[in-house]
Structure formats: structure tokens, C-alpha cells
Image (tube, grey):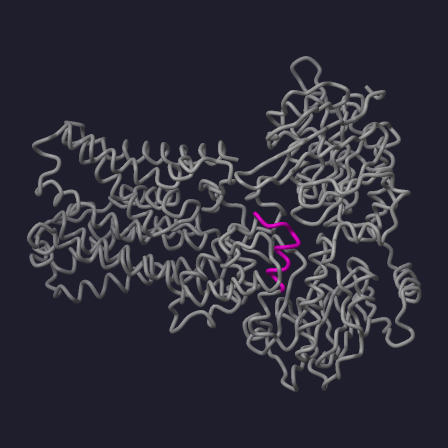
């Protein structure tokens, strides 16, 4: 099958009622090629993926060939799978409590001998596949004991378990979005391995760095149409950003232009099992980025500040000290928080945009406990309009929004009564360039209003772009601070590497 | 080879740490019906109002089948009167469900409330005192549930089953296995069985409870926060909602409402015995689940639950008028729940 293109689609169109989500898309993925599909949130990428994996039927398509076979319709996921389409999603669909073998067998079944299943043969076969994806682990290892990138590898192994000759198209849907950035390189290595084995890979991602590293071909989708499709060599990073984000990208405010106020929040020798002697001050009008690798303690710091976790030491806000950790008292005192785990801890998934938008400050849209329908709608609509949430429908369910738009709602909802201190944990993870620009604009606006902002991030780029100061954490400690002339990408990168060589990662 | 696992838009995408591994109401319920815009309006309307439509169809069918009996004033009065207690109990079951928890003890709370009222009345206690006592007992049962669930973190499924069973033992001990029929408070019986013109009197407290819950659910910050907790307790916590307090309060209110329902029930049937709890529990929970498929599909809601109680009431009454036996009620309760929930799920899936 390898002599055929993995996928040829022409004139692929999908309408949902009056809305055309995918318009006449042509897409060709060659065998042994990594074809990146990029575009802003809501550009139709996910719909394309869902069509190819058999979850949506296209409204119309001129020609559709998968693995060289003419396809009339992809009526179900089963049909797509039989044609050799394999999908690995950001949510890998693995059961943490089961072993690698059991997870693979969940989908593929066990090897059998007569009526009985053969553990030995199953294990052997699993080991072979693991070898293929470059994961050197025993099939009996529990998935929960694996590093995140290793789990991605297990999902890959599961996808190609039937043999690579049966796989015509491997779709990787934002698989690195939830990954600590330092493990992305491991996953890319696995992708490269699979590609060298001859699979056609459709790679959906927001992260341009990795696209330049891995992709052979790039197709850019905007508003459901292909705006560019060419070998990666024909693009530069700024081109791609420009294409994807359009005019939405504006640089964040130049640093230092806002006069700094007094120290708003003063953290003194915080100590718990993940933090050691963490002290820092952030002034009003200042954005401090806290950077470090996965497990460095930045998220723990955020949780402690918001009263979700205990720590000894003192936290002073405007000179006032906090007692026991309590989210409500922190919020009342003026601390806001946007968690990293957007889906699990941030949004009410089956709640509407309106319900999510007003939840943190229901008091402002109610009187004596009675909700004012009008005030609530007004507040939600203002938020949607001002921060360009799409679709601009306050009654849409949060799950109908792309990740970037969900994040806009989560950040923007603090703006109705701006907090004195806002802590954001990985605010732009899995978010496209346009939404990122909106979120940066929000952060900048808070700072202009005199708030202190703490951005917890693993991205040097983000730390550079936002931070007036960058604090480096490792192993639960503050190990360095960068500002002024020392605040440059090169120094940060060096320090980040140096600071973590001793600790290593799960791999 | 497998079908790749694509998440539906409403799926639980990350393995957000669930506190416990017991069935959660949201998991057992039809997924929120999140119809894409390509589904026809008809399908949308059908799935949203299926329960309402079935109720209307049932009324029409029975009216045609039983021209002389079904749509008579007496029969309407009977249906409304004999389901007022069920409505209050359904409201009791609904509130914790909105917050994402089960209360399986409400049937037993109803039971012990009838028993306590009967025992106290026989001993000569005045009626208002019996009401006060059972409401306090109901609140205490709710508090006990709330303690285990919010303080110790035990699953509500297990907690309320355990607490309910203990409560049923107390009922048994109080009645000593007898059916209590002597010394019952006549004013209560008169009220619960009486009527004001065409309306049964007992409908009044039921309607009041219903309207209050509707207002609380739709128009108050309490209702909104409770809804948020049910949708995601973790996200609610991070949005500053006092999750434990909210959840705990629903159990206390559920206990009070169930006790009130039991107090009225004594007047309605004129006897008290241990062991009736379970037969009240299922219809109440079923109505809440059935109600979650209509009006506000995908969410436990007060209006939907009211319609569901009415649907079951009409169905059972119609069957009985046509000579169905005493087993018509449970048969109908179970069958209609499966039918309606199944249909809603099917429509939702087809529309995707």
C-alpha cells in the first residue's frame, strides 16, 4: 500500500446547518510524510479530523482516497479504521491502572491459543510493537508509572499494533498539547520513527516550533479553507504565524512603560513538600513570569497562593497576612487564579458560556441571592464581545468552544472585578496564536490597571514576551531571577538547562 | 484493530480526579443533548419535549379509551391528590442530584416520618409538635448524610444507602412490625384527603414546594452555584463556590422535604407502617432522571421533574382505569423511565 498516497481528498466540504465549517478542502498526505495541519481555533481542523476518522460524514466530497482505495463514504469510525485510519488524540484514551499490554489489548485483543489467551505470545507481540515505536519498557509496566511522553508512545503502539502495513493514515491530533514542553522532543522522536516505517502522518498542532522540527509539508486552514499548502521549507516561522493568526497578533505592551507601584504581594519562605524557601515580591503593574521545567514547583506555588494547598511561611497581600488556606478568602482579598487543567478544573464543560462567565462573581449580577437575568446576560455579552470569544453566543456550551476560546472566557471572567493579583498557570497551553494574543492583551490590561500578575509557564517565549521579570524555579526553589539586560532568551535557555541537569526528568 | 477513540464534545476529556469511584448521577444520565445545527428542528423539539409529548398523548389516549371516567373531576382530583406526596419526594431527590450526588435515604426518611407522627399522635402529642419533630428528624438525617459525604468524603451512594437502612431499622423498632392505625391525627387526615372545590387540599403544600424549588433552581445564586457544583465540583471550587457547604445543604433540605412528605403521607393513607420506603424512593429518583431529559435536556431540573411525576401519575391511573392490576405502578415506573431515557439518548446520538 505504501506506493499510494496515504490520503487524497479533494473538495471536502462540511456544513452544520447554515454554517460551512470546511469548504472545498484539498488535502494530500503522502506515505512516509508528516503533513502538518495548522490553523487558528475554529478553523475546521478538528472537523477535518473527525471526518477522516469517520465521526462526521462530509456534506460533499469530490474525491476521497485512503491508502489508494477509493472511498465513497466514511460512515463510521469502524469503516475508517478498516481503511487503515488510526487516530491518536490529545486525550490518549489509556487506562492508567492497567499495564501497557492490557491497554494495547483493550483495543487490539490478545493473542490466543485455541480458546485460551496466551499471555506469553501477547507479551512478545506487544514488546515487538513497543520496540517499533522506540519505547523500551516491559509490557507489564503500569501506564500510570510512565512519563507522559511514554504514554503517547503507548497510544502509538496501540494504533500500529495490527502491523504498519494495515495503517494507511495516522492522524495525530494535538498530541503534544498537554505535554510538558520538555517531553515534546521525545514524542517527536516517536513520530519520526513511525514516519520512517512508512506511515503517512497527519499532524495537527498549535506549536510552530515542533512543526518546523517534524513536518515535511504544511497545510494552513483558516475559516474552513486552505490558505496555503506547501513544503515546510517554503515557510518561515513569522510567515506561518501571520497566516494562522491573520491580523489578530499584536505585540504585548513594551515592558517598563507602566509605572510600578508598591509590593502588592509579598511571599516569604514558603515551605511544603513541593516548595522550599520560596520568597518573592510582585509589585502593582508588574508581570512576573515564573519559569521552570515540569515539576519545578511553579504550579504548587500557584495553588498555595490561591489557597488550594498548604504551606508554611507567610503570604502578605497589601500588608495583610493570610491564615489558613481557603479559596474564598483569597478571592475576597483580591487574588485571582486560572488553573492549568482547563478542562478538569477550569470550565464547567456542560455549562454555557454565560454560566461560566459569571460564576466567579455571581454577586455582581444578583441582588439578595436572586439572579438578575438581564445583568447576567449583559455581563456575559460584554465579555464575549470585548474579548472576541467565538462563537459569540453566550448560550453555547463550553464544550462547543475551542480550547483557545474556553481559555479566553476563563481569563476574561476575572475582568468584571479585576483582582489585585492574578495568577495564571500555563495560560496559553494548547491555545492558538490569535487566542494567545487576546489573552496577552487581557494580562496587559490588568497590569495597566495596577494589578500584579504572575504567569507560571514552561515556555521561554512566553516568559520573555510577558515578564517584566522572570524568576527561574527548579526543584521547588527559586534559583535565579532575570531582569533588565540579563532578560534575554539566550541567558534564560542556558539557565533553564543548567538548573535542571541535576534533577533530570522522568525519562 | 480498534476504532480510534474520538471524544464526543460532551465527553469527560481528561481523567479529572474523581473523588470516588461510585456511580455519579451525571454519568448515569443521558448526556447533555448538544445537538449540532444540522439536525432538523423537529428532532430538536422532539427530543427536548419528548416527555411532555408523551404525557399529552397518554392523556388523550386514556381520555378516548375511558370516556366516562378518565377526564372526570373526581379522577383528576384523585390523580393530583395521590401524587402530591410523590411530587414533594421527587423534589427532595432532585436537589442533591443537581449538585451531582445521590440521596437514596429519602424513601426511608419519609417512612420514619409517618411512623413517628403516628406514634407521637397515639401518645397524645399535638399535630404541630409532630410536624416540628419530624422536620427536625429529617434535617438530622440530612446532616448525618452531609457529614459522611462532605467531611469524610464517602460516596453519597453508599452513605445514603447506609443511613437509610439504619433509619429503616428505627422505623421497624418503633412500629414493632405493626401497621399503626389507631390514634392518628384526624385534622391531618381531613386535610390530606380533603378538597377545596375541584382541587385536593394536599396539592397546595406540594405546589408551594414545587414553586419554591423552581424559583431556587432557576433564579437564585444558590441554584446557579448548585448547578455549577453538579457540572464540575473542582471547577466550582476554583471559582470560589463553597462546594462542601452546597452539597451538604442539599442533603439537609432533602431530609426536611422527605420528612414533610412523610407527614402528609400519614394523613393521605391513614396508616403507618415500616417498609414502605423503597416503594417511594424509585419513583422519586426516576422522575428526576426522566425530568432531566426534558425542558432543560441534559440537566436535572425542577419543571422537567414535575412533568415526569405527572406523566407517571397519568399513566398509572389510566392503566388502572383499564383494569390493570396492582403491579401496574412499578411496571410503569420502570418501563417509562427506560423508554424515555433511552429515547432521549438515541435522539441525541443520531443527531450527532
On the question of residue B105 being in view, the answer is: yes
Quadrant in the rendering for residue A162: top right
Is residue A402 part of the magenta span, yes or no? yes
Q: Report the residue at 45% width, 46% height from top.
A: B25
Is residue B130 part of the magenta span, yes or no? no
Tell whether A496 sits left or right of B192.
right
On the question of residue A136 being in view, the answer is: no
Q: Is residue A325 above or below residue B45?
A: below
Q: Is residue B258 above or below residue A100?
A: below
Query: Which x, y percent locates residue B141?
Result: 34, 59
Stretch in magenta: A400-411
Query: Which x, y percent locates residue B23?
Result: 48, 44
Quadrant of the drawing holding the N terminus of chain A:
top right
Query: Which x, y percent locates residue B49?
Result: 35, 41
Q: Report the residue at 65% width, 27% height from top.
A: A61
Quadrant in the rendering for residue A429: bottom right
Q: Is residue B56 above or below residue A439?
A: above
- Residue in front for this viewpoint, A9 or A147: A9
Q: How many marks?
A: 0
Q: Report the residue at 77% width, 73% height from top.
A: A288
Amino acid at each position: 500500500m505504501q506506493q499510494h498516497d496515504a490520503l487524497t481528498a479533494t473538495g471536502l466540504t462540511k456544513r452544520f446547518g447554515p454554517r460551512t465549517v470546511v469548504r472545498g478542502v484539498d488535502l494530500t498526505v503522502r506515505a512516509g510524510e508528516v503533513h502538518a495541519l495548522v490553523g487558528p481555533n475554529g478553523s475546521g481542523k478538528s472537523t477535518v479530523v473527525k471526518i477522516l476518522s469517520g465521526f462526521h460524514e462530509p456534506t460533499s466530497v469530490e474525491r476521497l482516497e485512503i491508502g489508494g482505495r477509493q472511498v465513497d463514504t466514511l460512515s463510521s469510525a469502524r469503516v475508517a479504521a478498516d481503511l487503515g485510519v488510526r487516530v491518536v488524540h490529545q486525550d490518549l484514551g489509556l487506562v492508567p491502572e492497567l499495564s501497557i499490554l492490557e491497554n494495547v489489548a483493550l483495543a487490539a485483543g490478545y493473542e490466543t491459543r485455541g480458546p485460551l489467551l496466551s499471555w506469553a505470545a501477547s507479551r512478545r507481540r506487544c514488546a515487538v510493537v513497543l520496540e517499533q515505536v522506540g519505547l523500551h519498557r516491559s509490557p507489564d509496566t503500569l501506564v500510570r508509572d510512565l512519563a507522559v511522553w511514554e504514554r503517547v508512545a503507548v497510544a502509538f503502539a496501540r494504533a500500529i499494533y495490527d502491523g504498519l502495513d494495515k495503517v494507511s493514515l495516522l492522524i495525530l491530533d494535538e498530541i503534544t498539547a498537554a505535554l510538558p514542553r520538555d517531553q515534546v522532543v521525545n514524542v517527536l522522536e516517536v513520530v519520526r520513527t513511525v514516519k520512517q516505517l512508512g506511515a503517512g502522518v497527519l499532524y495537527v498542532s498549535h506549536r510552530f516550533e515542533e512543526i518546523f522540527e517534524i513536518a515535511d509539508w504544511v497545510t494552513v486552514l483558516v475559516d474552513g479553507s486552505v490558505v496555503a499548502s506547501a513544503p515546510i521549507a517554503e515557510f518561515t516561522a513569522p510567515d506561518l504565524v501571520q497566516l494562522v493568526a491573520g491580523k489578530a497578533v499584536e505585540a504585548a505592551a513594551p515592558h517598563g512603560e507602566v509605572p510600578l507601584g508598591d509590593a502588592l504581594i509579598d511571599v516569604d519562605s514558603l515551605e511544603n513538600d513541593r516548595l522550599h524557601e520560596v520568597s518573592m515580591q510582585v509589585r502593582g503593574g508588574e508581570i512576573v513570569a515564573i519559569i521552570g521545567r515540569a515539576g519545578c514547583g511553579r504550579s504548587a506555588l500557584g495553588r498555595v497562593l490561591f489557597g488550594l494547598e498548604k504551606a508554611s511561611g507567610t503570604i502578605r497581600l497589601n500588608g495583610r497576612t493570610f491564615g489558613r488556606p481557603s479559596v474564598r478568602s483569597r478571592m475576597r482579598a483580591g487574588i485571582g487564579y486560572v488553573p492549568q487543567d482547563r478542562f478538569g478544573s477550569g470550565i464547567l464543560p456542560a455549562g454555557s458560556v454565560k454560566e461560566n462567565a459569571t460564576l466567579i462573581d455571581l454577586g455582581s449580577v444578583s441582588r439578595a441571592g436572586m439572579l438578575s437575568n438581564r445583568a447576567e446576560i449583559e455581563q456575559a455579552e460584554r465579555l464575549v464581545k470585548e474579548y472576541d470569544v467565538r462563537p459569540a453566543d453566550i448560550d453555547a456550551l463550553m464544550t462547543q468552544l475551542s480550547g483557545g476560546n474556553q481559555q479566553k472566557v476563563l481569563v476574561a471572567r476575572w475582568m468584571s472585578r479585576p483582582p489585585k493579583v492574578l495568577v495564571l498557570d500555563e495560560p496559553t497551553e494548547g491555545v492558538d496564536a490569535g487566542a494567545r494574543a487576546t489573552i496577552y492583551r487581557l494580562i496587559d490590561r490588568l497590569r495597566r490597571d495596577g494589578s500584579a500578575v504572575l504567569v507560571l509557564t514552561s515556555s521561554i517565549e512566553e516568559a520573555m514576551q510577558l515578564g517584566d521579570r522572570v524568576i527561574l524555579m527548579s526543584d521547588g526553589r527559586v534559583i535565579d531571577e532575570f531582569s533588565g539586560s540579563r532578560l534575554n532568551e539566550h541567558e534564560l535557555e542556558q539557565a533553564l538547562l543548567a538548573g535542571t541537569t541535576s534533577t533530570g526528568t522522568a525519562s | 484493530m480498534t476504532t480510534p477513540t474520538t471524544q464526543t464534545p460532551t465527553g469527560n476529556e481528561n481523567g479529572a480526579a474523581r473523588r470516588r469511584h461510585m456511580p455519579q448521577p451525571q454519568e448515569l444520565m443521558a448526556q447533555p443533548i448538544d445537538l449540532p445545527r444540522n439536525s432538523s428542528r423537529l428532532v430538536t423539539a422532539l427530543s427536548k419535549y419528548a416527555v411532555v409529548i408523551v404525557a399529552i398523548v397518554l392523556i388523550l389516549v386514556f381520555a378516548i379509551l375511558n370516556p366516562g371516567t378518565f377526564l372526570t373531576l373526581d379522577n383528576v382530583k384523585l390523580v393530583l391528590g395521590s401524587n402530591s406526596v410523590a411530587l414533594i419526594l421527587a423534589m427532595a431527590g432532585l436537589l442533591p442530584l443537581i449538585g451531582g450526588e445521590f440521596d437514596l435515604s429519602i424513601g426511608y426518611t419519609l417512612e420514619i416520618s409517618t411512623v413517628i407522627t403516628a406514634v407521637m399522635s397515639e401518645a397524645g402529642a399535638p399535630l404541630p409538635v409532630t410536624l416540628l419533630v419530624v422536620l427536625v428528624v429529617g434535617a438530622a438525617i440530612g446532616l448525618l448524610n452531609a457529614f459522611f459525604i462532605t467531611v469524610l468524603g464517602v460516596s453519597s451512594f453508599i452513605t445514603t444507602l447506609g443511613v437509610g437502612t439504619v433509619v429503616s431499622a428505627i422505623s421497624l423498632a418503633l412500629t414493632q412490625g405493626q401497621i399503626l392505625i389507631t390514634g392518628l391525627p384526624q385534622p391531618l387526615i381531613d386535610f390530606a384527603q380533603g378538597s377545596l372545590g375541584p382541587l385536593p387540599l394536599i396539592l397546595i403544600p406540594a405546589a408551594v414546594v414545587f414553586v419554591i424549588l423552581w424559583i431556587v433552581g432557576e433564579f437564585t445564586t444558590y441554584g446557579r452555584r448548585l448547578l455549577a457544583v453538579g457540572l464540575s465540583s473542582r471547577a466550582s471550587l476554583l471559582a470560589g463556590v463553597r462546594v462542601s457547604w452546597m452539597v451538604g445543604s442539599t442533603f439537609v433540605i432533602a431530609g426536611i422535604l422527605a420528612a414533610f412528605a412523610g407527614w402528609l403521607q400519614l394523613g393521605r393513607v391513614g396508616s403507618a407502617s415500616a417498609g414502605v420506603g423503597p416503594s417511594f424512593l424509585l419513583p422519586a429518583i426516576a422522575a428526576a432522571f426522566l425530568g432531566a431529559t426534558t425542558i432543560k435536556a441534559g440537566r436535572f431540573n425542577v419543571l422537567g421533574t414535575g412533568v415526569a411525576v405527572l406523566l407517571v401519575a397519568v399513566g398509572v391511573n389510566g392503566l388502572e382505569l383499564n383494569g390493570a392490576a396492582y403491579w401496574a405502578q412499578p411496571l410503569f415506573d420502570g418501563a417509562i423511565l427506560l423508554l424515555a431515557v433511552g429515547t432521549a439518548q438515541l435522539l441525541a446520538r443520531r443527531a450527532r
